């Protein structure tokens, strides 16, 4: 048998605390927020969520709906014509999210519609979209400013600049600390995300990062240290050597990917190993090659990245330690 038992999927029923009626869900079909491997994410309308939270005030749904009250939501919807495999994967993602528990640094699940198709997953809406796009827009803006380049160390305080578009080192460190909190939580709960990257982090109100897209996330049972993927299309430049070579995904391969995410953050959306063909990445890493310290990147920040990229997964830094080191760096500049 397969020791890497997949996550159980529970059939939807009327008593499921997460299930809401489709007529209570407003979906703005003309406001597509993104599209993934299957289906797309749309802006949801304001709904009287509180009235839906009647089933159990202490249930996660009750708590989440209370938080969602008068908030906009995002709705991930799988088209009705999707194949059985996509439906299965989507139901698995929904089942997994039900067990995650609420955390400030996750794009939390609010509700779902699985009793009929199209299947819908309702999550918190993040008004700035994904972190990669967020950083790249600001990078472009800062590059246009005379003489400044992307110097986030001495950002201009002049009124002529759009302060929303000026990125500071403090903000970047806050983002990094927030994301490490989210991943520390996931790892404590026994989950491996497997697709940690700036494109899968969402930004809300310009200040809050939340980990999103749990499509590839897996629950690791207590007696297992890692999950072996059966393959599929995975982003090589974010993957650890053991993940590329043996499809071995663990919390330690998430740590490696987080190091690449730190590179994306500190370069305001830079691409890792630019110009390198994906098939050259593994030989490069196995001969000891690593991404060099980017311009303007503080030494101690790069030092965290390097600790994420130990060849031996056992020697790699842990999320709690990453979070502490980054928080100390943040304290030191404020
Ligand atoms: N794109 C994908 N998911 C999103 C969300 N929850 N909020 C905003 N944009 C998104």
Image: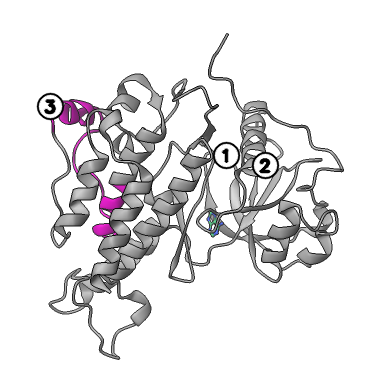
Q: Is residue 227 visible?
A: yes
Crowding at mark 3 (Cα within 10 Å: few <14, some 14-19, many 20+): few
* Alpha carbons under labels 2 and 3: distance apart: 45 Å
Query: Label for residue 257?
Result: none
Q: CA distance from mark 3 to mark 1?
A: 37 Å
Residue at x 48%, y 61% (from the top left corner): 129
| Residue located beneath label 3 in the image | 287
Please name whichever residue, 236 or 52, is drawn nearer the observer in this view of the structure.
Answer: 52
Q: Position of residue 300 (x, y in %)?
A: 18, 56
- For marks 2 and 3, the one nearer the N-term is 2
Q: Which residues are magenta?
A: 260-288
Residue at 77% across, 55% down: 58
Q: Position of residue 127 (x, y in %)?
A: 52, 67
In what quadrant of the picture does the C terminus appear?
Answer: bottom left
Question: Is residue 45 in sight in this rendering?
Answer: no
Rendered residue at 44%/57% (across/down): 130
- The figure's colour scheme reads one colour
Would residue 220 be found to the left or right of residue 155 on screen? Answer: right
Sequence-first tag of 1 and 2: 1
Which is more N-terminal, label 1 or label 3?
A: 1
Is 281 a magenta residue?
yes
Q: Which residue is mark 2?
A: 79
Contact between marks 2 and 3 (CB within 8 A): the answer is no
């Amino acid at each position: 048998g397969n020791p890497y038992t997949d996550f159980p999927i529970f059939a939807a029923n009327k008593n499921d605390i997460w299930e809401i009626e489709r007529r209570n869900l407003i979906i703005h079909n003309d406001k597509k927020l993104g599209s993934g491997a299957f289906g797309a994410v749309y802006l949801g309308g304001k709904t009287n969520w509180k009235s839906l939270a009647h089933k159990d005030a202490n249930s996660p749904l009750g708590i989440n709906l209370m938080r969602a009250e008068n908030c906009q939501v995002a709705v991930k919807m799988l088209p009705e014509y999707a194949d059985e495999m996509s439906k299965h994967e989507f139901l698995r993602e929904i089942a997994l999210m039900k067990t995650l528990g609420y955390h400030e640094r996750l794009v939390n699940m609010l509700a779902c519609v699985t009793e009929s198709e199209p299947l819908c997953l309702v999550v918190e809406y993040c008004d700035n979209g994904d972190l990669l796009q967020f950083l790249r827009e600001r990078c472009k803006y800062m590059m246009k400013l005379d003489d400044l380049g992307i110097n986030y160390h001495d950002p201009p305080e002049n009124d002529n600049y759009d302060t929303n578009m000026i990125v500071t080192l403090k903000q970047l460190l806050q983002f990094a600390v927030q994301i490490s909190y989210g991943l520390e939580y996931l790892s404590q709960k026994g989950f491996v995300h497997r697709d940690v990257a700036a494109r899968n982090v969402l930004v809300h109100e310009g200040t809050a990062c939340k980990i999103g897209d749990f499509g590839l996330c897996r629950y690791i049972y207590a007696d297992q240290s890692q999950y072996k993927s059966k393959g599929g299309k995975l982003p090589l430049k974010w993957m650890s050597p053991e993940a590329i070579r043996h499809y071995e995904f663990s919390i330690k391969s998430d740590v490696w990917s987080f190091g690449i995410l730190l590179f994306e953050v500190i370069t305001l959306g830079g691409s890792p190993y630019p110009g390198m063909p994906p098939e050259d990445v593994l030989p490069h890493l196995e001969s000891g090659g690593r991404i060099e310290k980017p311009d303007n990147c503080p030494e101690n920040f790069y030092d965290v990245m390097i600790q994420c990229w130990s060849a031996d997964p056992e020697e790699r830094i842990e999320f709690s330690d990453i979070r502490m080191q980054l928080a100390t760096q943040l304290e030191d500049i404020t």
